[in-house]
Amino acid sequence: MKKSVAVLGLGRYGISLAKSLYDMGADVLVADKDEDTIKEMAGFCTVAVVADLENEEEIKALDLKNMDIVVCAMGRNMSASIMVVAVAKELGVPLVVAKSSSERMSSILKKVGADKIIIPEDFGGNQSARILLSDTFMDYFQLDDTLSLVEIKPRDNWIGKNLIELELRKKYKLNVVAVKDSQTPWGFIDPQRKLGKDTTLLVIIETSELNKINKN
C-alpha cells in the first residue's frame, strides 16, 4: 500500500528526500514558505503548498492527520521544528521524523514528540527515503556503488525458519553479517537458528537487490 508522507521545509535535504520518496512511489506533500521553491517542486511531488511553518494554523491547514509520516526537514529553525513536531503529534501522525543540526536540538525535538531524529550528515535524502518507506529496513548504509549494509527485520514468511531453509544468499544476493534480538546483543548467527519476530539481521546486499527484499 502506498504511504503518504509530508516533507515540511525544502532546503537541500528536504528537496532530495521529497524527490526520492516520490520516485519510490509515495504520495508526497511538500510545504515551504518560499514560493519559488514550491513552484520548482510541482513536478516532483503529489501536492506542493506555500505555508509559514512557524504558524500553527497554517500547519494544521495542511491536514497532516491523514499522513502516515511527517518529516520536519528544517534543521536550523528550532521554533518551526518544534511547532511542526508538536502539531503533528497532536494530530495523531503515526511517525514524526525531525531533522536536527545539534545534540541539543535533537534532545528538545524528542521531548516534544519526535519519533526519529535524522542528522543530514549521516543520512542523505535517498537513504532516508528507503528507510522511511520500508517495513523491513531499520537502517541502511551504502558501502560503495554496488553494495549496501542494511539492518533489517525478518519478513513474515521468514519467521520460524533458519538461514539454511531460507537460502537468502541465493534468493537475494545477501550475506548475513550478524544478528540480535530483544534478549541478546549483536553476534554471529548460527545458520540453524530459527528467526523470530524480535530478530534483527545485519546484512550485506547488492544495492540492486534492495527493492526485491523489501517487496511483500
Image (spheres, helix red, strand yellow):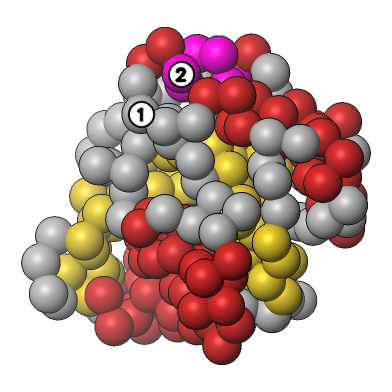
Name of the residue lying farthest toward the bottom? 43
Residue 182 shown left or right of residue 167 in the figure: right
Image quarter for residue 216?
bottom right
| Residue 178 on image: x %, y % | 27, 43
Q: Are marks 1 and 2 in contact (CB under 8 Å)?
A: yes
User: Does the rendering let one see residue 40?
Assistant: yes
Q: Is residue 72 left or right of residue 164?
A: right
In the image, which disc is placed on residue 101?
1
Which segment did they paint magenta?
105-110
Q: Residues within 10 Å of mark 2 (few under 14, many from 20)?
A: many
Going by the image, does 182 lie left or right of 30?
left
Q: Quadrant of the N terminus?
A: bottom right
The alpha-carbon separation of the residues under discs 1 and 2 comes to 7 Å
| Residue 181 visible to an observer of this rendering | no
Crowd around label 1: few <14 · some 14–19 · many ≥20 (10 Å): some
Report helix, strand or loop for mark 1: loop
Residue at image point 46% right, 18% down: 105
Amino acid type at circle 2 is Met
> Which residue position holds label 2?
105
